[in-house]
Image: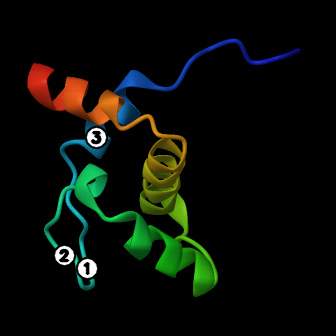
Amino acid sequence: MENTQGPDPQMLLDLVKVKMPFGRFKNVVLCDLPVSYLEWFLRKGGFPEGKLGQQLSTVYEIKLNGLEEIFYTLKKRF
């Protein structure tokens, strides 16, 4: 059966609230990370395991597909 649910609203909200816990962009909100940094992860073997990796992957996909308006809307609301 096909999954017809949209993205998890809490996960999207976390992308505009949670800060990068380490590295060059430590303390930068995930949605504000530059695409070049996300691409660096991919070149170095992929995103970290677990929830952070899933969040970074989601940010990358949103930015890659030109859907950053999602972030602007969420930032305004919350």
Disc 2 and disc 1 in contact, CB within 8 angstroms: yes
Q: Amino acid at mark 2?
A: Lys
Q: Amino acid at mark 1?
A: Phe
User: Relative to residue 31, is residue 1 drawn left or right?
Assistant: right
Residue placed under numbered mark 1 in the picture: 22
Secondary structure state at the residue bearing disc 2: loop
Residue placed under numbered mark 3 in the picture: 14
Q: Say few, some or many: other residues with alpha carbon within 10 Å of mark 1 (under 14 / 14 to 19 / 20 or more).
A: few
Q: Position of residue 34 (x, y in %)?
A: 32, 65
User: Relative to residue 75, is residue 61 drawn left or right?
Assistant: right
User: Relative to residue 5, is residue 54 drawn left or right?
Assistant: left
Report the residue at 54% width, 41% height from top. 65
Label number found at residue 26: 2
* 8 relative to 43, above or below: above
Q: Earlier in the sequence, mark 1 or mark 3?
A: 3
What separation in Å lies between label 1 and label 3 (alpha carbons)? 17 Å
Q: Quadrant of residue 35?
A: bottom left
Closer-to-camera residue (20/38): 38
Report the residue at 51% width, 78% height from top. 41
Secondary structure state at the residue bearing disc 1: loop
Disc 1 and disc 3 in contact, CB within 8 angstroms: no
Q: Quadrant of residue 27?
A: bottom left
Report the residue at 30% width, 44% height from top. 15
Secondary structure state at the residue bearing disc 3: helix
